[in-house]
Image (tube, rainbow, N blue to C red):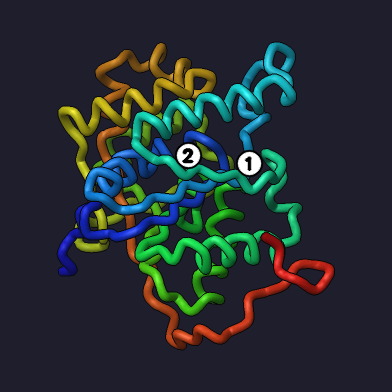
Amino acid sequence: MTPLLPPADLGPILSIWAHPDDETYLAGGLMAGAVDAGHRVVCVSATAGEHGTGDPVAWPPARLAPVRRWEAAAAMAVLGVTDHRWLGHPDGGLAAVDPARGVAQVADLIDEVEPETIVTFGPDGATFHPDHRTISGWVTEAWRATGGRSRLLHAAASVDHLLRWGPLYEEWGIYMSEERPVGRRPDELAVALRLSGPALDRKVAALRAMATQVAPAVRLLGEERFRDSNREECFVAVPAPVERDTDRPVPVAAGGHRQG
C-alpha cells in the first residue's frame, strides 16, 4: 500500500478546475495546507461560472460573472492562495472549445509553473458535468504531452463518503448523467484528508465566501451537516506515462501555434 501524501509533501501545486468553487470544494484544504508548508500554489479557473444560478433573471451572466470573480478572490484570500488565474472560456461551453487550444493552455501553465503536483477532476468530473470532464481531459493530456514530469492527482470520492452522502446527492440531483462515481477504497488513494478544527473552519470560511453558490446548501443542510459533508478531500494518483518524453510536441490550436 502506497503511503498517503500530506499536503506538505506535494511541493509546488498547479490546481486546475472548471468553475470558481470547484477548487475549494474538492481541494481547499489541500491547497491551504500546501501554502502553510511554504509551497507555491497556482489555482486556475477555466470559466467565471457565469451561468451558475437557478435564477438567471435575477443573475444574468453579465452580473454573475464579476460577482463570482470577487467571491473567488475572497475564498483564495482565506486559503492563502495568491496566484489565481482565469482561462476565459464560457461557462457550460468547454466541450465546444477546440481541445488543442485547451490542452495547449494547460501545457503552457505546466511549463511556466513547473509544479511538483497537479490536481484536477477525475474523468468523471465528480458530478459528470461536461465542463468538469473536459477540464480533466485537457489537464491529463497536457500532462502527458509535457512528459508527465509532475505528479498528477485526480479528485475522487471515497467509498465511505458516497455511502454516507450519496443519497443526499441523488436527492439534490447533482449528477448530470445516468452514470455514477465509483467510490475509492483507502488502498487506492494517494491523498486522503479528513479536515477538522481550524483546517475545516478555514475551508468552510472559504466556501461561504462564495455565497451565490454555497448559501442554498448551507440553508438546506444546516451549518454542522454542511461542515461535515466537506471534511473529506481524496485524490488518486494517475500512473506516469510509459514514455516520459519531454520533447513530445504539445498539440497546437487552430492557426498552428500554441495558445497561452
Residue for point 20% across, 41% down: 194
Q: Position of residue 36 (x, y in %)?
A: 24, 43
Answer with the quarter of the image where residue 215 lies.
top left
Residue named by callout 2: 22
Residue 10 to residue 249: above or below: above
In the picture provided, is 251 more to the left or to the right than 223? right
Residue named by callout 1: 47
Residue for point 59% across, 65% down: 108
* Amino acid on which the number 1 mark rests in the picture: Thr
Q: Quadrant of the C terminus?
A: bottom right
Residue 85 to residue 146: above or below: above
Q: Position of residue 56 (x, y in %)?
A: 71, 19
In the picture provided, is 91 more to the left or to the right than 242? right
Residue for point 56% across, 48% down: 132
Q: Position of residue 220 (x, y in %)?
A: 40, 14
Camera-nearest label, 2 or 1: 1
Observer-nearest residue: 219 or 63?
Answer: 63
